[in-house]
Every structure is written in structure tokens, then in C-alpha cells.
Amino acid sequence: MTRVLQAARLHLVNPVVILGIPWLVVSISFAINVAIFHLTPAGEEEGFSGGVLALYITVLVVFVQAVTQLLPFAMGVSLSRRTFYLGTALVAAVQALGYGIVLSALVSIENATDGWGAGLRYWAPGIFDVDNPLLQVFASGAPMLAFMFVGIGMGVVHQRWGQAGTWGLIIGSLVLFGGLAILITWLEAWGSVAEWFGDQSAATLTIGLPLVLAVAAALAAYPGIRRVVP
């Protein structure tokens, strides 16, 4: 356990990158959205923005870099791949919970101020606003955990197979999801897909499905990281 904590602390050596950059990016996005809703007709009616996605995407990129930049160093100081993975997973879990708490607080402020005085729903758009501060922690934190483990998985792919693996993952994902879109369109099943999602609870969509994705990404990344070479 001590070695796992040592691996986790590696990620906190430069907190400006792992914490500062994501919040800097989303703060700029938030400021732009607030200005738009205050200065344009967008604020005349209550609406939501997808700008908070910038936070999730930036965190994903940070965890990709955490694996690609820190794993070779960890192996160089005699930390095993398994230990590094567990330490990284621990950091992801703690950070996801922390992000969930902060985002829940921001959502509460947003709701109390009528969307920052402009009807803006930024920090939990659409179904992600669950009207319960405790549940909001998980509704915001579970998708964050999914993004983190997807980032870890992408970092593992890059370390294991290099740029060819990264591009193969990107192209393979495009082919997979593009093929699914073609199949659903051919079957004329978009209505059924929409109906299925409409039948699910907010907790399922915001917590359950992201946790399933996080677990799937974690399980897929673990065998890969065990075979990474220095």
C-alpha cells in the first residue's frame, strides 16, 4: 500500500498541471458563457451550455499525459507497472470525488443565483442537474471518473504501441461508432434508441452508465499497462 501511495504522489509533484490547467480552461469557458448570456439575447430565456465539457476533456488529456510522461519515470525508480496503475487509479478516484464535490457546490450557487443572473445552466447542463446536492456529487463525479479512465487507457495504448496504436485507437473508434450509426439508421431504430434513453432514470444516465464505462476502461487498460516496456 505504501508503494501505491508513492505512485499516487507522483501525480501531485506538479499540481499546476493536473489541477490548475483543467480549472483554468473551464474558467475561461465559463467566463465566455456568462458574458454571452449577459450581453446577448441568449440570456433572455433560461438555457444551458455544454461548455463544462471543456473541463472533462482537459482532465482526460491530463490523464493521458500522466501515463505517457510519468510511467517511464516510475519504472525508472523501480515502481512496478501494477503499482503505478493502482496509484493512478487511486488519484483518479479521489480527484473524481473532489471534482464532484466542487461541481455540486457550483451547481448549488448557480441554481441559487438563477443561473448567475442570466438563466445560464453551465456546471450541470440538462439531465446532469439532479436537484440534490449529494446526488449531484455523483452525477458530476461519475462522468469525470469515466473520462479519467478513458484518458488512462489512451495513455496506456500510446505507451504500449506508440503513435500507431494511438491512431489505430482513434480510427477504430470512428469505424466502430460510425458503423453503429449506419446500422441504427439502416434498421430505422433511432426512435427506439431515443425511447430507451428516455425510459432511463437520471441516476442511470448520469451515474450508472458512466461508472460502467469507467470500469470497462479500467479493466481494458490494466492488461495493457502490464506489457508496457521502458
Image: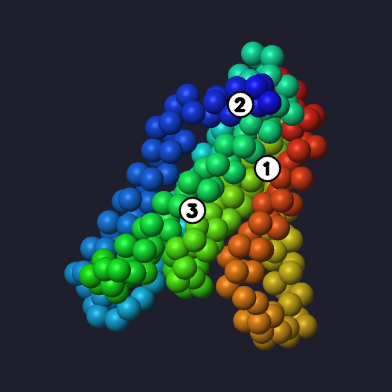
> How far apart are the alpha carbons under marks 2 and 1?
20 Å
User: Which residue does the image show at 33% across and 50% down from the upper left?
Assistant: 27
Name the secondary structure under disc 2.
Answer: helix
Answer yes or no: is residue 107 visible: yes
* Label annotation for residue 153: 1
Asked if residue 108 is positioned above or below residue 145 in the image, the reply reads: below
User: Which residue does the image show at 49% across and 28% down from the upper left?
Assistant: 12
Q: Which residue is mark 3?
A: 100
Query: Is residue 179 found left or right of 101 in the rendered image?
Result: right
* Label annotation for residue 5: 2
Asked if residue 153 is positioned above or below residue 74 in the image, the reply reads: below
User: Which residue does the image show at 76% across and 75% down from the upper left?
Assistant: 183
Coloring scheme used: rainbow
Q: Amino acid at mark 1?
A: Gly
> How far apart are the alpha carbons under marks 2 and 3?
22 Å
Quadrant (top left/top right/bottom left/bottom right) for the N terminus? top right
User: Which label sits in the foreground, 2 or 1?
Assistant: 2
Label 1 neighbour load within 10 Å: few <14, some 14-19, many 20+: many
Sequence order check: which comes first, mark 3 or mark 1? Answer: 3
Answer yes or no: is residue 140 visible: no
Quadrant (top left/top right/bottom left/bottom right) for the C terminus? top right
Name the secondary structure under disc 3.
Answer: helix
Query: Is residue 201 found left or right of 229 in the rendered image?
Result: left
> How far apart are the alpha carbons under marks 3 and 1?
21 Å
Residue nearest the observer in this picture, 168 or 190: 190
User: Which residue does the image show at 55% across and 41% down from the upper left?
Assistant: 94
Asked if residue 194 is positioned above or below residue 37 in the image, the reply reads: below
Sequence order check: which comes first, mark 2 or mark 1? Answer: 2
Query: Image quarter for residue 83?
Result: top right
Residue nearest the observer in this picture, 169 or 155: 155
